[in-house]
Image: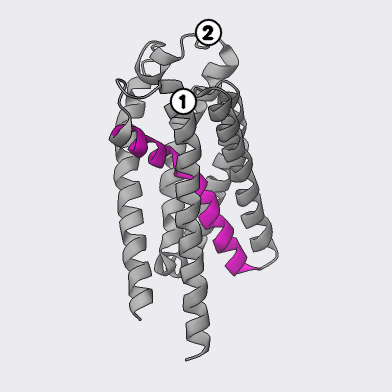
């Protein structure tokens, strides 16, 4: 019971944190509505702001990623899934289509021009590949009727989705322009955000497996 309570508390913390940071991201994203090529992150990407493919991918990504973050939150509530199966399917489709049709292609283009040099580029591209793989695997498993594996891969998919939040947390807490090389810090941060999120996801999966085993022996 203690472990189960711990998992529930951890889920509440994760959901609350993701929701708050999603709202903060919406505030950040709002500055790009003007389509001004010199605001926010674009000020550091002047070498590519005139590239129509990069700019299109950038706007597609920033204006759709928050929907991914909020849609994915529903998977942390078993009660919601039980009581709103039809709505869950609709939100699930929105999440999957958003990732596979919109964000994976857009992020591939953005990844090719990522900050952080080769470290940052490879990090973003690997994130993109894992994002697509975990999401496709989740879809294939639910089509086979394997609900457990579907949930597992959706958790892994969402772990990659939320790397954007972890990346910004690390940057805001630890980056100091006087002591850090921006390109190196950026590239390392891409990898660190991915590793942290996958470790958290595997922690949840391991605890969930332990809880299932305990119930079988009761």
At which x and y percent is residue 182?
41, 22
Mark 2 sits on what residue?
A: 50
Looking at this view, name the residue that lies furthest to the bottom.
Answer: 218
Q: Which mark is residue 200?
A: none
The residue positioned 34% from the left and 39% from the top of the image is 169
Tag in front: 1 or 2: 1
At which x and y percent is residue 100?
61, 40
Q: Nearer the viewer, residue 147 or 116?
A: 116
At which x and y percent is residue 160?
51, 45
Left-right relation of 74 to 92: left
Report the magenta stretch's main SS: helix
Left-right relation of 10 to 185: left
For the residue carrying disc 1, how many other residues have a C-alpha within 10 Å: few (<14), some (14-19), or many (20+)? some
Q: Do the residues under discs 1 and 2 have CB atoms within 8 angstroms? A: no
Q: Nearer the viewer, residue 10 or 188?
A: 188
Q: Secondary structure at mark 2?
A: loop
Mark 1 sits on what residue?
A: 184
Left-right relation of 206 to 134: left
Q: Nearer the viewer, residue 141 or 187?
A: 187
Looking at this view, name the residue that lies furthest to the front.
Answer: 179
Left-right relation of 95 to 13: right
Q: Secondary structure at mark 1?
A: helix
* Residue 35 visible, this orientation: no
Residues shaded magenta = 146-172
Separation of marks 1 and 2 at Cα, in angstroms: 25 Å
Q: Nearer the viewer, residue 108 or 119?
A: 119
On screen, 182 above or below 200?
A: above
In the rendered view of the protein, which quadrant contains the N terminus?
Answer: bottom left
The residue positioned 61% from the left and 38% from the top of the image is 126
At which x and y percent is residue 192?
46, 41
Whether residue 167 appears in magenta in the rendering, the answer is yes
Q: Report the label total.
A: 2
């Amino acid at each position: 019971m203690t472990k189960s309570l711990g998992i529930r508390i951890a889920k509440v913390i994760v959901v609350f944190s993701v929701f708050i940071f999603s709202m903060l991201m919406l505030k950040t994203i709002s500055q790009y509505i003007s389509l001004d090529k010199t605001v926010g992150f674009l000020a550091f990407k002047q070498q590519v702001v005139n590239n129509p493919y990069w700019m299109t991918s950038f706007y597609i990504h920033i204006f759709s990623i928050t929907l991914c973050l909020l849609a994915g939150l529903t998977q942390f509530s078993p009660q919601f899934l039980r009581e709103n199966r039809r709505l869950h399917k609709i939100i699930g489709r929105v999440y999957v289509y958003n990732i596979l049709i919109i964000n994976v292609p857009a992020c591939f283009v953005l990844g090719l021009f990522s900050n952080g040099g080769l470290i940052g580029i490879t990090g973003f591209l690997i994130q993109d590949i894992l994002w697509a793989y975990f999401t496709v695997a989740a879809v294939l498993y639910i089509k086979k009727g394997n609900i457990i594996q579907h949930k597992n891969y959706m958790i892994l998919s969402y772990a990659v989705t939320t790397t954007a939040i972890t990346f910004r947390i690390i940057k805001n807490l630890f980056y100091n322009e006087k002591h850090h090389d921006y390109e190196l810090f950026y590239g390392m941060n891409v990898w660190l955000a991915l590793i942290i999120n996958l470790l958290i996801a595997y922690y949840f999966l391991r605890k969930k497996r332990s809880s299932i085993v305990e119930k079988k022996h009761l």
